[in-house]
Image (cartoon, rainbow, N blue to C red):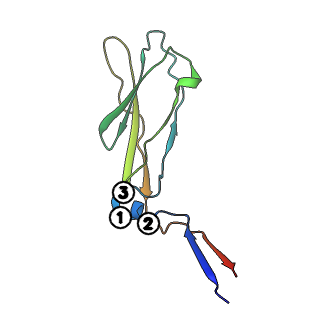
């Protein structure tokens, strides 16, 4: 009797070797809408670099959130500013998040056929 073993790894190990990201960890930021009538929008900064500009009228809560791209391991910091045609506000408070490299979840299927 010949038994065939089928071993299937559902996680591609090469992703572990070629990607610097910690398993697609992302962050969602949210803030209180600015009420100034001449508001044009918001800038979001990650690690002191402007990563997105969101154009938005004043008092529009739907514009007051942003999702990051997948993050590399380590500590990351964010803040937002409001801007109008002439100037940019002072930065909001800064929020931080530590991304730690963790072990991936691996699923194994074993099929024994005779």
Residue 43, how many percent across, how many down?
Answer: 38, 28
Residue placed under numbered mark 1 in the picture:
17
The mark found on residue 13 in the picture is 2
Residue 64, how many percent across, how many down?
Answer: 52, 28
- 38 and 57: which is toward the camera: 57
**Mark closer to the chain start, 2 or 3:** 2
Residue 62: quadrant of the picture:
top right
Residue placed under numbered mark 3 in the picture:
19
Q: Residues within 10 Å of mark 2 (few under 14, many from 20)?
A: few
- 95 and 73: which is toward the camera: 73
Report helix, strand or loop for mark 3.
loop
Q: Nearer the viewer, mark 2 or mark 3?
A: 2
Query: The N terminus lies in which quarter of the figure?
Result: bottom right
Residue 108, how many percent across, how many down?
Answer: 60, 72
Name the residue at 60% across, 69% down: 107
Report helix, strand or loop for mark 1.
helix
Name the residue at 53% across, 24% down: 63
- 87 and 105: which is toward the camera: 105
Q: Residues within 10 Å of mark 3 (few under 14, many from 20)?
A: few
Q: Are marks 1 and 3 in contact (CB under 8 Å)?
A: yes
Query: The C terminus lies in which quarter of the figure?
Result: bottom right
Vertically, is 87 above or below 13? above
What separation in Å lies between label 1 and label 3 (alpha carbons)? 6 Å
- 67 and 23: which is toward the camera: 23
Q: Are marks 2 and 1 in contact (CB under 8 Å)?
A: yes
Report helix, strand or loop for mark 2.
helix
């Amino acid at each position: 009797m010949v038994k065939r073993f089928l071993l299937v790894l559902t996680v591609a190990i090469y992703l572990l070797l070629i990607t610097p990201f910690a398993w697609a960890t992302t962050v969602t930021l949210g803030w209180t809408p600015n009420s100034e009538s001449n508001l044009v929008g918001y800038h979001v900064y990650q690690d002191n670099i402007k990563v997105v500009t969101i154009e938005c009228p004043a008092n529009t809560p739907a514009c007051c959130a942003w999702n990051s791209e997948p993050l590399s391991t380590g500590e990351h910091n964010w803040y937002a500013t409001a801007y109008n045609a002439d100037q940019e506000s002072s930065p909001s408070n800064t929020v931080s998040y530590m991304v730690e490299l963790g072990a991936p979840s691996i699923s194994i299927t074993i099929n024994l056929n005779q």
